[in-house]
Amino acid sequence: GEDVEQSLFLSVREGDSSVINCTYTDSSSTYLYWYKQEPGAGLQLLTYIFSNMDMKQDQRLTVLLNKKDKHLSLRIADTQTGDSAIYFCAETETLYNFNKFYFGSGTKLNVKP
Amino acid sequence: SAVISQKPSRDICQRGTSLTIQCQVDSQVTMMFWYRQQPGQSLTLIATANQGSEATYESGFVIDKFPISRPNLTFSTLTVSNMSPEDSSIYLCSVETGGAGTFGSGTRLTVV
């Protein structure tokens, strides 16, 4: 199977920027994804990037993709306490009629007031 | 994107019993996916449920332990059978819409 790796924890102060990093193995993944999981909740799709792009910006979120190094990052500008959650990156393997998701271990973001 | 309703949201069960988790989607989808998230871990795909055929299980998961039903294009159930404390996890169903995975809010299962 595919291997997606993330650091486990990140702690930042409110108002700072957060950068969550991810490395993956499947270069054929058409899209790469970032999901957010708040305590006791399911996964919420935050953003995704097409594999032919190297950057995508969506309000406070910036996704950077280095396809050569198979490195994906999520930058959250002006981090708020409400951003405290676990962030999962994911890649997909396209099987004959669906995309199989592989998730990283998740990075727990702690935002201190 | 699709909206997924999953129930129960949580349950505490005795070992040796079984629990059936329901997943309802607000639109017709070909495939539904069931994941397990063990405490402090990432998501692992249990099986893929296609309407009208038997579910396809990932390595390490078997039908006797996790029977799945898929009676129509908007509904699926996952049963966790003969539970042990090691089955304590969050179970999530998911569908793929527009290339992205949409997840239910999960069922938090504790086996005592």
Image (cartoon, grey):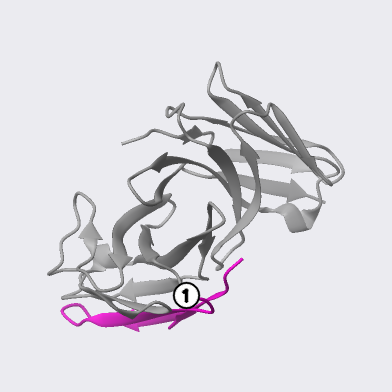
Identify the residue at horizontal 64%, vertical 27% (top origin): A65
Residue B30 is left or right of residue A106, and the answer is left
Viewport quadrant of the C terminus of chain B: bottom left
Q: Is residue A64 left or right of residue A42?
A: right
Q: Position of residue B67 (x, y in %)?
A: 20, 73
Residue at 84% x, 38% y: name it. Answer: A16
Query: What subunit carries mark 1?
Result: B
**Amino acid under label 1?**
Gln
Q: Is residue B62 magenta?
A: no
With respect to residue A72, does A33 lie above or below? below
Give, as a single range, the part of the protein colored magenta. B1-27
Q: Secondary structure at mark 1?
A: loop
x then y, percent, for residue B91: 39, 67
Query: Which quarter of the picture shows residue B109?
Result: bottom left
In this view, B22 is above or below A49: below
Which residue in the rendered view is the most extreme toward the top? A68
Q: Note whether A63 is above or below B91 in the view shown.
A: above
Q: Quadrant of residue B38?
A: bottom left
- Residue corresponding to mark 1: B28
Residue B65's spot in the image, x, y percent?
16, 68
For the N terminus of chain B, give its image quadrant: bottom right
Residue A97 coordinates in the image, percent (x, y): 36, 51
In the visual, does A94 lie left or right of A71? left
